[in-house]
Amino acid sequence: EVQLVESGGGLVQPGGSLRLSCEVSGFTFSSYRMSWVRQAPGKGLEWVANIKHDGSEKHYVDSVKGRFTISRDNAKNSLYLQMDSLRAEDTAVYFCARDRLWLLQGLDYWGQGTLVTVSS
Amino acid sequence: SYELTQPPSVSVSPGQTARITCSGDSLSKQHAYWYQQKPGQAPVLLIYRDIDRPSGIPERFSGSSSGTTVTLTISGVQAEDEADYYCQSADSSGGSVFGGGTKLTFL
């Protein structure tokens, strides 16, 4: 059974940092591109970042470039999102997802999300 | 940057057909994907590559494409289909974009 479990969310002050983790099981993690997607309270989905299966290629939405860093540890079957210089508008539930978009298969498995709240 | 436009809401009577559109210039070059999200839950992939349905998705969900507009059709809408629906496409720079989402409600 495929499982993606996010962790690391919480309350952080503006300007602070947080590191999200996504631990996966049930598939060969090292073979797949992965994405982070977020959803602000009461709002729609926003793609945040993706990373190629070997970590050699990363892409970000403009609003987080220079502040967020996506990474992965294939030996630990884990995906990460380092979030620095956090702003109130980064408050959201953050989902990790298996990204098969470039195989024309979409984001086919998602975690349940972890809530990040940026507030003083 | 690419933008995908969806109607904020679509209303339908149970048993009728609902159609949700998604428009954007990128859709003439990129495939579209559809997701269903119920309150407090993660999104679920409904349609990929404009028209294909993953295993386990009911046949009443179908997708179509014409030019810069794609459409999600739900035939014989059931109570459990009340949810938010999002379209998505890849962009040319390696990322992707979601539409603003459409809330499907019953009349």
Image: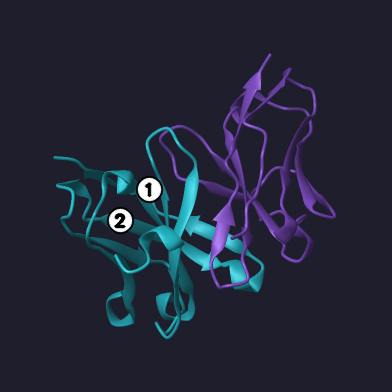
Chain colours: A cyan, B purple
Q: Position of residue A114 (x, y in %)?
A: 30, 48
Vertically, is B96 above or below A95? below
Question: Residue A90: x percent and y percent?
Answer: 32, 49
Dot 2 crowding, Cα within 10 Å, few <14, some 14–19, many 20+ = many
Residue sitting at the far top: B107
For image coordinates 64% across by 73% down, the residue present is: A103
Question: What label sits on residue B56 in the rendered view?
Answer: none
Mark nearer the N terminus (2 vs 1): 2
B53 or B68, which lies in front? B68
Badge 2 sits on which subunit? A
Label 2 residue SS: strand
- Up the image or down, B47 lies above or below A42; here it is below
* Circle 1: element type: loop
Q: What residue is shown at x 80% (from left), y 28% (from top)?
A: B17
Q: Residue at 56%, 62% (x, y): give it.
A: B96
- As measured in the structure, the alpha-carbon distance from the residue carrying label 2 to the one carrying label 1 is 7 Å
Which picture quadrant has residue A7? bottom left
Q: Residues within 10 Å of mark 1 (few under 14, many from 20)?
A: some
Q: Quadrant of residue B14?
A: top right
| Total residue callouts | 2
Q: Position of residue B55 (x, y in %)?
A: 66, 55
Amino acid carrying label 1: it is Gln
**Type of the residue with mark 2:** Glu
In the rendered structure, are the residues bearing label 2 and label 1 in contact, judged by CB atoms less than 8 Å apart? yes
Point out residue A48 in the picture as x, y percentages from the top left corner.
Answer: 43, 59
The residue identified by callout 1 is A112
Q: Residue at x 42, y 85 (%)?
A: A54
Q: Is residue B48 visible?
A: no
Q: Chain of mark 1?
A: A
Nearest to the observer: residue B48 or residue A76: B48
- In the picture of the structure, the residue carrying the numbered disc 2 is A6
